[in-house]
Image: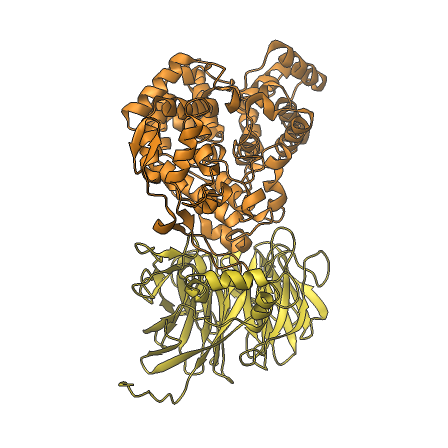
Amino acid sequence: MPLTTVARGRVYDWSHAIGRGAATGTGFNYPQTMCLDKNGNVYTANRGNENNFGMRVNHVKVGGPGEEELLAEFFQYGEGDGKSIWPFGVAVCAQRDRVYCSDEWNNTISVFDTSGKFIFKFGSTGSGDGELQRPAGLAVESNGNLIVADSGNNRLQVFSPEGKFLGKCGHAGKGPGEFNQPWGITVDKDGHIFVADWKNHRIQKLSADGKCLMCLGSYGAIQEPEGAYGVTTFGPFVTGESEKAGYPPTDRFNHPTDVAVDSDGDIYVCDWGNHRICIFDSEGGPITTLIGDAHALSRWGQQSVDANPDMMKARRRVKSLEPQWRFCFPTAVDFDPQSDNLIVADSQRNRLQVYKKVRNYTDFQANL
Amino acid sequence: MAYQEDIALMAHLMRRAGFGATRDELEARVAKGYEATVEELLHPEAQPAVDAYTLLRYQPASLLPGGQPPMGNVHWLYYLVNTQRPLQEKMALFWHHVFATGNSKVDNYDQLLEQIELFREKGLDNYRDLLLDVAKNPTMLFWLDNNQNHGTAVNENWGRELLELFSLGAGNYTEVDVREASRAFTGWTFETKIPRLPYGRFPWKFQYRPEDHDDTEKTFLGHRGRFNGEDIIDIIVQQPACGKFICRHLYNFFVADEPQVPAWPIEPPRDQKAMDMLVGAFRDSKFDMRSVLRVLFNSDAFKEARFKHVKSPAEVVVGTLRFVGGYEIPKPGYGELSMNTAYMGQDLLNPPSVEGWHTGKEWINSGSLMARINFMAEKVGNTSSPGVRGIINRLKTRGALNPEQLVDGCLDLLGPVEVGNETKQQLLSQANEWGQTSWDNGNAQVADQHVGQMLQLIVATREYQFA
């Protein structure tokens, strides 16, 4: 798999991986959503498991290769203020230095300062105005209002920074402006709202007042090629023939979970069930896909291997480490306009993969 | 009465070929017909598959759960509770019992789930092909040490269990056959997989290493040749003992309780005529499980075997959850819920040994009986659950119920359940204390309670432990 992907005037260069599987501390535990802070670092909402391990939001430094660092963690499992049962969404309000976190079991939004100190929470179960049913992705508008993907009610709701209901849009359905269990959302620099319409297998671009401006993508699932190595029963599949064998065309999604927009207007879709990131221009024209290129271990990952000689021994006996490079059910994507980092939460691998969108790339001499 | 008999027969079929059915489903299936229902069950591909993506959205840790319970159990329970292909899942359970492989050694629930997926996909197809897939299944290879079975140093674990527990049964081969079969499977192993740290689990892949295979001549069950593993399987399936062994498992699982497997060489089958019929179908169809099951479910022996099978813990837990409803989407606590079969003596994905579980009466002891009754009673006593509401709504349409009508109505709608006179009198004595049950004049809450408590009493009866 090429580490540098060149397509239609864009260049994406794999930079590094961050994290490892960990129920607490330095690592991740099935991140569901992710959000950048104003310094280019990320908050991730980790789902955990039925042993009630791993649930938390953690704040992690992105930096360059080997610079990962745990900055804070909060919203761990438990009842009461500042705790969660099923953490899902996370969003940062840079103006107010706040972090919003959704709990889709308690149907609440908890508000923290950027260090993870609990401030207050709001929301209750239901389908009325301001009530929530499995709140999923979150995004903050430039005016500080919070948009919630109210996934069980198949709508978006907008709240003031104090948690007061301001408005809503959408309902269950397949038409424009309708949703089927929306997951991640983002707001671009022009105030447009992008929604990963999870069970409708598409992305919707909405105006700031909730009108559908564009639907992007339709259903298409990854297929297992003959003789492939299935990393899981549901893919990804690794073949010797072609690194993208089995993957559907770029605009075919299988339960997309998140979307990001960069400073040029290019759109990044987290195509969860197809284990990839699909990249489009601002009009929805397909550019390319990224399928994961983590050929080098993260710093914390390397520490795990170094501390366990049997792991090192086994790794030296493995025929190919390529299955480890690939995304496995990536859930979240963000683009940092300051660093041109494209960051992907690689959920089943409990790590982030970071790419750089390279400007002014000079091609190499082709006859080397 | 004829219609009621049709309902009872359909309920029997759905308890055995699935995990029970609500009265609404039974009525729909009776309208469709018994044989048509059997065909539908035998062709699960016509029904939608379980929505695994919804499971992974809510419980992502259930995809590659590693070696710690309960996320592997959560994964399978979600399939068992939600499947619209009940016989497919029941066959996965059947093969898991026959080709018993456990997390106690494998320490990889993800790999056990992959094996269950094999049973799910191929469990109704050809036994010979399935046996070959099992012989190549890395989870099985590790479980029975075939990765330690080398051309220069034979390990007989897989070869022995292949003959004793997976195909022929004790007494139908010699120690020499075990040795020769094991030699034929030398070189059948798996690739080194990417280890669990730091990014979680990766799968095993089957690998054949010709340089580690003993390619010399072997003598196996009277045949001579330079046999490889596949040749051994082809010889095995042609043995009359093979059909007898597999069909006795089928009879024990689907029709009526047999003695435990180690007793089979000395205890004759419970119904030799039925066995002969099944063995004939196995042979004539060239080992096609779908064909054998078609004969089984349409046979008088099956239809007359109502309540001659003690429910396994999996049947108790899954049947109850499907009946009461409300467990379609995982919720916090699903992990604890998924371990209930273990509390009753059947730790799914972790059987006690390669022999699987002892079945029939051995499911019942003082501890497991309490566990199963407490579990069922808690669930059916919840009068707000969709399944119990369904029973209440049907009873309500009958107007005020005298004690006998309440008992009969609950027995009918919970099965129909057949109870003996002594049990009936005990149920009636409680109902008599309540007097008339009526939903009129503000009595709805009390009437609901009467139904819920009557259902709790019924699931605690001796008779309800049978399917």
**Does A59 sit above or below residue B326?**
below
Give the image location of residue A192, x and y in percent: 46, 75
Q: Nearer the viewer, residue B417 or A221?
A: A221
Question: Which residue lies at the image location 28% right of the left edge and 27% below the top edge?
Answer: B285
Q: Is residue B354 left or right of residue A273?
A: right
Image label count: 0
Q: Nearer the viewer, residue A282 or B176?
A: B176
Chain B image colour: orange
Q: Is residue B25 left or right of residue B338?
A: left
Q: Nearer the viewer, residue B32 or A342?
A: A342
Give the image location of residue B110, x and y in percent: 50, 49
**Does A341 sit above or below residue A248?**
below
Q: Is residue A148 visible?
A: no
Question: Which residue lies at the image location 42% right of the left edge and 59% below the top edge?
Answer: A273
Determine the image quadrant of residue B125: top left
Q: Quadrant of the N terminus of chain B?
A: top left
**Does A278 sit above or below residue B33?**
below
Give the image location of residue B98, x and y in percent: 47, 32
Determine the image quadrant of residue B403: top right
Chain A image colour: yellow
> Farthest top residue?
B421
Q: Is residue B253 visible?
A: yes
